Image (spheres, rainbow, N blue to C red):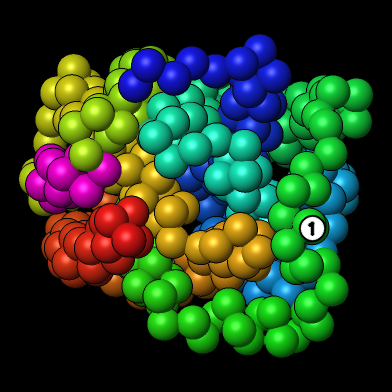
């Protein structure tokens, strides 16, 4: 805990957090726009679930295809290539004119955007020791909160005043700044190339990494880790508006206050993870999140203040789980396999998330676009079950990491 960030490390953390801000915002903006899109495009909850899952499925496929090449190039160049593609896909979303156009645009965005996270995580593992990764991920994960405080309220304001295309165009505008920062100030990241990873056959490298027994523990935990967020998130705003009676214009207040609290709890959970223990932090986060999910999804009515308190506690638990789980699983792969491992892990997470979003659309029903959601409590119990199974899988990861550290 006495280790401090160098000036360049602080820049890298800030850049990666900003990159994640734009990528996360691009995905999360669909949730608060859900009630608006369902009405404007005249789609059903199941169709909206397909729009959300389209990004996840395409991201999952592209992650697998990119895994074999992930350790063959300078990570800086790889990051820039996929980020440019992500910005282009988001631009297509900003000019979409129909449900089919938007569905296709989300696929393009997912192809590129889904790989950015894995490259960023590989960079974190390359540049920061395990003892610092909790703090790094706590700061990077604050991008989720920042997207709620800054991005989502602004996006909702633009959507209600200028139309639902405006938030996507806003993301394109701020993403250009991140791209410029990569070009001007991010140094080449090539340490993994000296291990001979660049000389491996891409297919062999992919298969070898995907089938290594030690890595399977991390992959299996990652698959279920995505289930909760991808299941609950797509219908979050619709549940608040249609079931709990929160006015659409008050949604920004919920996201702003929750996000402000998450910006504090995220870095705090990173420090707790590094000092208290990564698995113990994950355990406590899972307990808190499970209680909040059952309570929240079972509500039939609640005041705005009560909803905000529940959301703050829910995101505190989610932050603890996300920060500690990455810090723990990042210790599994060896340096020559790190990029491929992160790509496969991200791909599996996206594919699992896509399946979760699609499944959520089957569990949750709505008689008309203006009627309350049905089946949301059932969805909450499914999410809790997935989290409890993940807890056991993550213990296996903890055991492997501890055994390696001892050896």
For image coordinates 40% across by 75% down, the residue present is: 214
Relative to 47, does residue 308 appear above or below in the rendering?
Answer: above
The part of the image, by quadrant, that contains residue 3 is: top left
Element type at mark 1: helix
For image coordinates 62% across by 37% down, the residue present is: 127
**First to last magenta residue range:** 278-290
User: What is the x, y in percent for residue 218?
Assistant: 39, 67
Relative to 13, does residue 381 appear above or below in the rendering?
Answer: below
The part of the image, by quadrant, that contains residue 188 is: top right
User: What is the x, y in percent for residue 363?
Assistant: 29, 71
Residue 394 seen in this snapshot: no
Main SS class of the magenta portion in the image: helix
Image-based side of 55 in relation to 259, left or right: right
Q: Mark 1 points at which residue?
A: 193
Q: Residues within 10 Å of mark 1 (few under 14, many from 20)?
A: some
Q: Residue furthest top?
A: 7
Count of numbered labels shown in the rendering:
1
User: What is the x, y in percent for residue 166?
Assistant: 73, 31
Front residue of this view, candidates 203 and 222:
203
Front residue of this view, candidates 345 and 215:
215
Front residue of this view, candidates 305 and 327:
327
Task: Let me know if residue 283 is in the magenta part.
Answer: yes
Image-based side of 71 in relation to 41, left or right: right
Give the quadrant of the C terminus: bottom left
Front residue of this view, candidates 57 and 20:
20
For image coordinates 51% across by 63% down, the residue present is: 333
Image-based side of 250 in relation to 107, left or right: left
Task: Let me know if residue 48 is in the magenta part.
Answer: no
Image-based side of 146 in relation to 114, left or right: left
For image coordinates 62% across by 44% down, the residue present is: 126
């Amino acid at each position: 805990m006495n280790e401090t960030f160098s000036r360049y490390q602080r820049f890298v953390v800030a850049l990666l957090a900003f990159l994640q801000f734009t990528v996360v915002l691009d995905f999360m903006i669909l949730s608060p726009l859900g009630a608006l899109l369902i009405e404007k495009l005249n789609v059903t909850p199941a169709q909206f679930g397909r729009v959300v899952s389209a990004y996840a499925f395409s991201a999952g496929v592209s992650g697998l295809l990119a895994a074999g090449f992930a350790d063959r190039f300078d990570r800086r160049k790889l990051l820039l290539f996929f980020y440019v593609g992500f910005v282009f896909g988001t631009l297509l979303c900003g000019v979409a004119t129909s449900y089919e156009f938007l569905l296709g645009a989300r696929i393009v965005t997912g192809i590129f955007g889904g790989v950015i996270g894995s490259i960023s995580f590989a960079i974190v593992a390359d540049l920061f020791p395990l003892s610092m990764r909790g703090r790094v991920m706590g700061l990077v994960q604050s991008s989720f909160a920042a997207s709620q405080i800054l991005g989502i309220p602004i996006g909702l304001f633009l959507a209600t005043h200028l139309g639902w295309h405006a938030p996507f165009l806003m993301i394109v505008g701020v993403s250009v700044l991140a791209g410029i920062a990569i070009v001007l100030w991010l140094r080449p990241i090539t340490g993994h190339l000296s291990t001979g990873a660049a000389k491996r056959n891409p297919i062999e490298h992919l298969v070898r990494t995907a089938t290594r027994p030690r890595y399977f523990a991390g992959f299996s935990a990652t698959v279920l880790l995505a289930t909760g967020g991808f299941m609950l998130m797509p219908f979050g705003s619709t549940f608040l508006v249609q079931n709990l009676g929160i006015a659409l214009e008050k949604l920004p207040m919920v996201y702003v206050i929750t996000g402000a609290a998450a910006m504090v709890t995220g870095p705090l959970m990173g420090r707790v993870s590094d000092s208290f223990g990564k698995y113990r932090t994950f355990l406590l986060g899972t307990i808190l999140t499970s209680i909040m999910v059952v309570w929240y999804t079972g509500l039939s009515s609640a005041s705005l203040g009560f909803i905000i308190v529940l959301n703050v506690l829910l995101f505190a638990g989610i932050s603890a789980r996300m920060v500690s789980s990455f810090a723990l699983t990042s210790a599994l792969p060896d340096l020559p396999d790190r990029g491929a491992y992160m790509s496969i892990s991200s791909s599996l997470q996206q594919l699992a998330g896509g399946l979760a979003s699609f499944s959520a659309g089957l569990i949750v029903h709505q008689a008309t676009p203006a009627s309350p959601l049905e089946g949301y409590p059932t969805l909450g119990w499914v999410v809790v079950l997935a989290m409890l199974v993940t807890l056991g899988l993550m213990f296996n990861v903890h055991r492997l990491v501890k055994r390696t550290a001892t050896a």
